[in-house]
Image: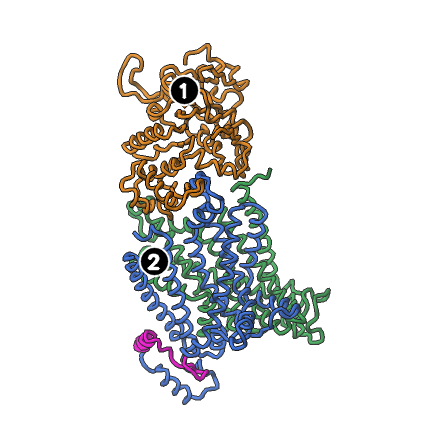
């Protein structure tokens, strides 16, 4: 008779999380060392060999300009990793600051929460597109736009955790002992919200990768010739019937990355605190 | 009510939970009988396995980890003997609510918050009888009235959150008895209630028992309640039955060292020769974990009368013709 | 019902407040960019006279606060202005394209819910079984795929290779209802699949929580048929959580629809928005933002009211 219990499932989850982490590590290494690993320059054209299927010379085939798809996917990984990291840093820092401020200053709280409600009333991609229309087509602008999209969620999370912690006794005790507000915040609140933030960061990363891909696919994100998985799929669209590796390779890359991030996020959430299950 | 008949026979029941941490032997050798119309109190500390015993009779424990691994459960109902261990799930479903009913400890969470109180009584009738809508509605209101709920026609349309804890427990009793089961299992029904309400609910249960004539298996850790409601008492320790006796006999002359220790640990308010008021007598040590039952008698590590041979083999349950039982190899030698 | 009306009014008021902030955010996005909006809109090849004319036409010479007030006033009167590139008002443009997007979103939501909820319930009932494990992994994978990629893959296999569906062929309602709906099936699958995965996972979690509750044990102790226990007792208590999920994922659905319309060439709001972004047709972008967020806030209001219907405890 098979044994099933919550501990067993947690172990299984950890195993999946480990697999996820391995995939991510591979992705990060590939992204970091892309200039060294990539067999070709991602923007080097070779018209003679355009639209060739995957083979020994080009592992993922070539696109309509004869550029090596594998190298492009690799550099696309680089772009996604950089974008994801920057967006997470932006959203986490901005969200934490706003969330903490919100939890300590009543008048600001109402205002900020209404703004965050408003921001969350747009679909991620729509808000991102609108911001990109106002900004320009560069990596920094993409980070700015996506960072703005994902800051409200982090702010809410931090504010919620901070409000809960504020009511607990040790914070009251610290205040009674005369510790300044800022010191209480830094010493007590931050370490306790850490777990929640890490878990949220992985999911934000995953969302950022997907949204950046959508932006670039629509032409509102990273413009070609810089390879982004999204604009690669856009370029491969017209060759759907004869060169499907052009959309399969970047698509599967997105799948692997986002799936790995979700597995890691779930694993972290289980490992750090089973109580968090309801929060994110 | 023929005193010679039996309603429920439990014979060396063993129920274990198989988890990643190993096998938890929640019930490891429990035997007792309940006769029609009789109230048997099942007594023990938390962790003794009394709730799991009750759930085993109903086959309601979560079944991937839990399994009945030994013993027999027989219910005599409507002239048929039902083997509750081997019975199919559809058969068990037919018995639950109609032949055997159970009420639980937490009235605040045991009722579905999204259904009216009347509906929760009516659906039992719908599941087990052929009555039409109007008859069901009438029986529902009658039952609510019988358990002491005022203005039952109106109350039937209330939701559980409109009712107090005591009233919710009354509704639970109505749900359990509306199909007139032969056996009612009550798992600590008054523990979560205020003391004043406790008395009312016990009073109600005594009245209904007289009226319906069902057998009552009353699970509790409170010896005071036992004295009020039980005809006979079965004492459990660490998953095993250690003593069974008539209630008066149990209180006057406990035969198992654990029972005696339990009675001694009751606080006494009066001074007297036989039981001078003084320091509370706790039983030293702790109940063993269901994952690690000690060999031999489970109480031996904490027993003042223990001898080396007590830890060698499990003492057999010795049953006297009168229905008393003790599981102690030294029972003839000691007066605990 | 008096309680319901009161709560509806209060929530409605809250909704208006949120819309006020939404309008402010929209204004901020468009008007607080550095540089001259009119110049950006017309591009580098515009003459100074053109720019000045556009500025006057859009009222950009007024001080910012006044522009803000005028913008709010227009929004309240539902006057969304004129498109810069299409020969129609923003309102008319959105209205003409709304039906397609609405149908797509509804089909996708229907698919996601009709498949996701029952599978989520089954997964919870057979927790740890092979169905549960397989479904969990597949659901996570489906939620990791961009809907536009799913759309392209579906086109490649089902439209091109197996010729079961039109390739980027939109069948307008005029061509017959069946043709019209048929052309929406693949886009609905593409948009609905990631959402189905989310709904599935969250339904499963909600059911697992509920199945552990005492009242479910009571229901079993009554000898009720298993279907009754699962549906009338367990799921009934999980349904508000499921409703929450569906409400929250609607916004993702709308986002997915926006992107997927371009893959399938559907003449919907999404295609309009994308074109407007590339053309810098700001009035349309503003209008679309207001309308879509308005729809989302309305949906939120509807789900809040639905909670009241579903859970009697909230009415007191």
Q: Is B274 in front, or is B209?
A: B209
Q: Position of residue B209 (x, y in %)?
A: 36, 29
Badge nearest the viewer, 2 or 1: 1
Query: Of B2 and A174, which appears nearest the observer?
Result: B2
Residue extent of the magenta highlight? C65-89
Looking at this view, is C6 or A64 the one in front? C6
The residue located at (44%, 57%) in the rendering is C245
Q: Which colouring convention does the figure follow? A: by chain
Q: Residue at x 56, y 69 (%)?
A: C182
Question: In the rendered view, does B173 fall on the left or right side of A197?
Answer: left
Please give the letter of the chain rendered in orange. B
Looking at the image, which residue sits at the far right? Answer: A56
Percent x, y for residue A116? Answer: 38, 62
What chain letter is assigned to the residue under label 1?
B
- Residue A274 within the magenta-colored segment of the rendering: no
Q: Which mark is residue B259?
A: 1
Query: Which residue was labeled with disc 2?
Result: A102
Residue C204 percent location from the top left of the image: 49, 50
Tell me if residue B286 can be seen: yes
Question: Which chain wears blue?
Answer: C
Tell me: residue A183, above or below residue A122. above
Which picture quadrant has residue B312? Answer: top right
| Residue C72 drawn in magenta | yes
Chain A representation colour: green
Q: Position of residue A120 (x, y in %)?
A: 41, 63
- Evaluate whether label 2 is on the same chain as label 1: no
- Report if residue A85 is visible in the image: no
Label 2 crowd bin: few (<14), some (14–19), many (20+), radius 10 Å = many
In the rendered view, tell whether residue C246 sits above or below residue B291: below
């Amino acid at each position: 008779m098979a044994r099933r219990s919550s501990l067993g499932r947690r172990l299984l989850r950890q195993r999946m999380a480990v697999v996820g982490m391995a995939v991510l590590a591979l992705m990060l290494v590939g992204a970091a060392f892309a200039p060294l690993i990539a067999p070709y320059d991602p923007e080097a054209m070779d018209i003679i060999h355009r639209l060739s299927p995957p083979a020994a010379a080009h592992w993922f085939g070539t696109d309509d300009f004869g550029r090596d798809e594998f190298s492009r996917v690799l550099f696309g990984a680089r772009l996604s990793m950089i974008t994801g990291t920057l967006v997470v840093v932006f959203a986490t820092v901005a969200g934490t600051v706003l969330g903490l401020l919100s939890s300590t200053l009543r008048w600001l709280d109402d205002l900020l929460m209404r703004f965050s409600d408003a921001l969350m009333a747009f679909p991620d991609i729509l808000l991102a597109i609108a911001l990109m229309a106002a900004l320009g087509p560069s990596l920094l602008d993409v980070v700015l736009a996506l960072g703005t999209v994902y800051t409200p969620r982090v702010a809410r999370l931090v504010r919620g955790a901070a409000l809960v912690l504020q009511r607990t006794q040790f914070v009251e005790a610290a205040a009674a002992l005369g510790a300044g507000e800022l010191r209480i915040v830094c010493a007590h609140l931050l370490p306790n919200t850490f777990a929640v933030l890490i878990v949220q960061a992985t999911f934000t990363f995953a969302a950022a990768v997907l949204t950046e891909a959508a932006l670039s696919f629509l032409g509102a994100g990273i413009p070609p010739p810089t390879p982004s998985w999204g604009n690669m799929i856009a370029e491969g669209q017209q060759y759907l019937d004869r060169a499907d590796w052009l959309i399969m390779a970047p698509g599967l890359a997105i799948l692997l990355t986002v799936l790995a991030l979700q597995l890691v996020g779930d694993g972290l959430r289980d490992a750090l605190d089973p109580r968090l299950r309801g929060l994110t | 009510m023929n005193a010679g008949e039996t309603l429920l026979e439990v014979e060396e029941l063993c129920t274990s939970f198989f988890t990643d941490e190993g096998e938890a032997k929640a019930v490891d050798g429990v035997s007792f009988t309940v006769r029609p119309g009789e109230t048997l109190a099942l007594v023990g500390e938390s962790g003794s396995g009394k709730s799991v015993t009750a759930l085993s009779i109903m086959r309601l424990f979560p079944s991937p980890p839990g399994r009945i691994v030994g013993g027999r459960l027989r219910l005599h109902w409507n002239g048929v003997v039902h083997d509750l261990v081997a019975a199919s799930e559809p058969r068990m479903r037919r018995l639950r609510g109609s032949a055997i009913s159970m009420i639980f400890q937490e009235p605040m969470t045991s009722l579905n918050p999204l259904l009216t109180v009347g509906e929760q009584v009516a659906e039992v009738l719908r599941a087990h009888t052929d009555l039409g809508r109007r008859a069901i509605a009438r029986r529902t209101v009658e039952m609510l009235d019988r358990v002491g709920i005022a203005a039952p026609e109106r109350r039937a349309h209330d939701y559980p959150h409109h009712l107090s804890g005591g009233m919710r427990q009354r509704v639970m009793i109505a749900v359990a008895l509306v199909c007139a089961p032969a056996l009612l299992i009550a798992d600590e029904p008054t523990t979560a209630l205020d003391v004043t309400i406790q008395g009312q609910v016990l009073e109600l249960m005594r009245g209904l028992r007289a009226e319906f004539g069902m057998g009552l298996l009353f699970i509790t850790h409170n010896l005071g309640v036992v004295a009020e409601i039980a005809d006979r008492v079965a004492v459990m320790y660490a998953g095993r039955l250690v003593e069974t006796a008539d209630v008066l006999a149990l209180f006057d002359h406990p035969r198992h060292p654990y029972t005696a220790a339990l009675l001694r640990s009751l606080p006494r308010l009066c001074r007297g020769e036989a039981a001078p008021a003084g320091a509370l007598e706790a039983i030293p040590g702790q109940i063993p974990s269901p994952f690690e039952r000690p060999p031999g008698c489970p109480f031996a590590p904490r027993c003042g009368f223990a001898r080396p041979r007590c830890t060698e083999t499990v003492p057999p349950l010795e049953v006297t013709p009168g229905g008393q039982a003790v599981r102690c190899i030294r029972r003839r030698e000691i007066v605990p | 019902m008096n309680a319901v009306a009161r709560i509806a009014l209060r929530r409605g008021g809250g909704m208006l407040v949120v819309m006020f902030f939404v309008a402010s955010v929209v204004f901020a996005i468009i008007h607080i960019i550095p540089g001259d909006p009119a110049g950006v809109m017309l591009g580098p090849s515009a003459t100074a006279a053109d720019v000045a004319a556009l500025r006057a036409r859009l009222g950009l010479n007024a001080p910012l606060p006044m522009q803000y007030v005028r913008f709010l006033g227009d929004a309240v009167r539902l006057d969304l202005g004129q498109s810069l590139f299409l020969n129609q008002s923003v309102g008319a443009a959105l209205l003409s394209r709304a039906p397609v997007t609405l149908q797509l979103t509804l089909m996708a939501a229907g698919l996601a819910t009709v498949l996701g909820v029952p599978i989520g319930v089954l997964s919870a009932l057979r927790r740890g079984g092979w169905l549960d494990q397989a479904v969990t992994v597949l659901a996570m994978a489906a939620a990791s795929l961009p809907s536009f990629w799913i759309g392209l893959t579906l086109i490649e296999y089902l439209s091109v290779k197996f010729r079961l569906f039109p390739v980027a062929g939109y069948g307008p309602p005029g061509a017959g209802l069946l043709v019209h709906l048929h052309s929406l099936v693949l886009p609905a699958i593409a948009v609905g699949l990631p959402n189905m995965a989310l709904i599935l996972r969250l339904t499963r979690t909600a059911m697992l929580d509920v199945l552990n509750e005492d009242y479910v044990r009571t229901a079993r102790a009554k000898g009720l048929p298993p279907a009754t226990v699962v549906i009338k007792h367990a799921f009934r208590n999980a349904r508000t959580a499921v409703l929450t999920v569906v409400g929250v994922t609607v916004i993702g659905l709308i986002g997915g629809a926006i992107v997927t319309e371009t893959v399938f060439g559907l003449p919907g709001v999404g295609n309009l928005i994308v074109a407007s972004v590339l053309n810098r047709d700001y009035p349309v972008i503003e209008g679309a933002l207001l309308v879509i967020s308005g729809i989302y806030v309305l949906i939120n209001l509807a789900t809040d009211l639905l909670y009241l219907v579903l859970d009697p405890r909230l009415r007191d």
